[in-house]
Amino acid sequence: MRDPAERAGITGMAAISVLGRGAHAQLAGGLAGATAFTPVRRFDVDRRRVTVAATLPDTGSLGDELAGVVREACEQAGLSPAQRAATPLFLAVHGHPHAGRESEVDGRPRSAAAFAAELAERTGLRAATRVYTCACVSASTAVADAAALMRLGRADRVVVAAGYLVEPDQFALFDAGRALAADGVARPFSAGRGGLLLGDAVSAVVLEAGAADPLAEVIGWGRAGDAFHTVRPDPEGGGLARAIGAALGRAGIAPDEVGYVNANASGAEGDAAEAAALHRALGPAAARVPVSSTKSVHGHGLEGSGLLELIVTAQAAHAGKLPVNAGYLEPDPACELDLITGAPREATSPYALSLNAAFGGANTALLVRAS
């Protein structure tokens, strides 16, 4: 195990999703295991094949919601105005944030960099920012970068924020590509699964090197590419397995010490590849480690998914209660895992993995330790 001064402690966190406002609402929803996919009212879906998503009513603009979670996370971490002014913002968001009027400048789409700079200014953070627009691994890549900088002694504190609110453009693209579940339920790892469903995901965490009393710690991370196909995952899970192995190796943790996996699985084709990756990376332990995908209750938040899921994973490890893999029908022989179905389970280890994958074969693994 690495020296505490080299680990990235989570000292503040905040989130919103269909499960509610506040970080604790996310774990509560995951433990309840009730899916929250309802007809979309935010925009017109009359011409769409699928018409449901996991949307929180009465949300503000993406910029306003991001500013809110950043401020809340900083307040929980106890950051003074001077500390905020010295802290960089790492933001995961779509390349052209769909944020209503604030997404345009002189009638043209606002760049993600300009959007991030404005968010930093609104929340009192250092103007220098990093922006991550690498699809569904955007947020987890930002966390991995922050943790790496801390281990190298190049950063003492970083605020990572990520956001996606279900909007018409991405919804139309996923629907036209027949990627959305026609039955209106996301069924990770289940036989009969029919695709993913989108969901709101806006969250922020404060990461601090050597924090004395963190909520949890990011102790390992890994990133790897499949180099297999522009859209389809490697069916043998090679890239994700390497990412998991790298995360465990950086932390000095053996596969049989992992007590929970919050999987990337969305109820789509890639679920079987992820199961293969887990067996490849964890060996015999893959048959015993409890697994669920919280996308089954809060939907797929695209660029925002990795951070929302990290928050749920960290809270689950801290509370000692593991979320349910909702929407499950029956076993798929290609996904032989110890899935958490029916009711939450008690955690038996402080170590948990949060996994993400994206089109193009990008894979990330974050290893957290409960405090």
Image (cartoon, rainbow, N blue to C red):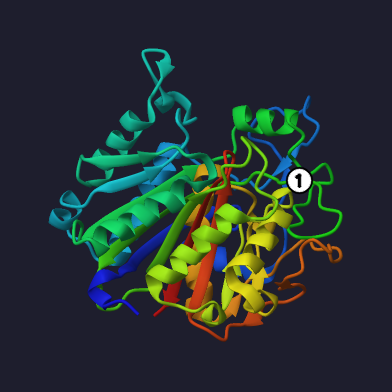
Q: How many marks?
A: 1
In the image as oriented, which residue stretches furthest toward the left?
82
Residue 153 sits in which quadrant? bottom left
Taking the image as shown, residue 328 lies to the left or right of residue 27, namely right
Q: Is residue 85 above or below residue 132?
A: below
Front residue of 114/77: it is 114
In the rendered image, residue 205, in percent from the top left (x then y), is placed at 37, 58
Of 40 and 342, nearer the camera is 342
On the image, which quarter does residue 297 sit in? bottom right
Q: Residue at x 63, y 78 (%)?
A: 285
Which corner quadrant holds the C terminus? Answer: bottom left
Quarter of the rendering occupied by the N terminus: bottom left
Q: Position of residue 50 (x, y in %)?
A: 78, 36
Instruction: Give the residue number, with chain letter if any, for mark 1.
Output: 195
Work out which residue is located at the far bottom of the displayed protein and give it.
348
Residue 142 rendering spot, x and y as whole percentages = 38, 50
| Residue 36 appears in the figure | no
Taking 314 as reference, is 348 left or right? Answer: right
Looking at the image, residue 82 lies above or below residue 250: above
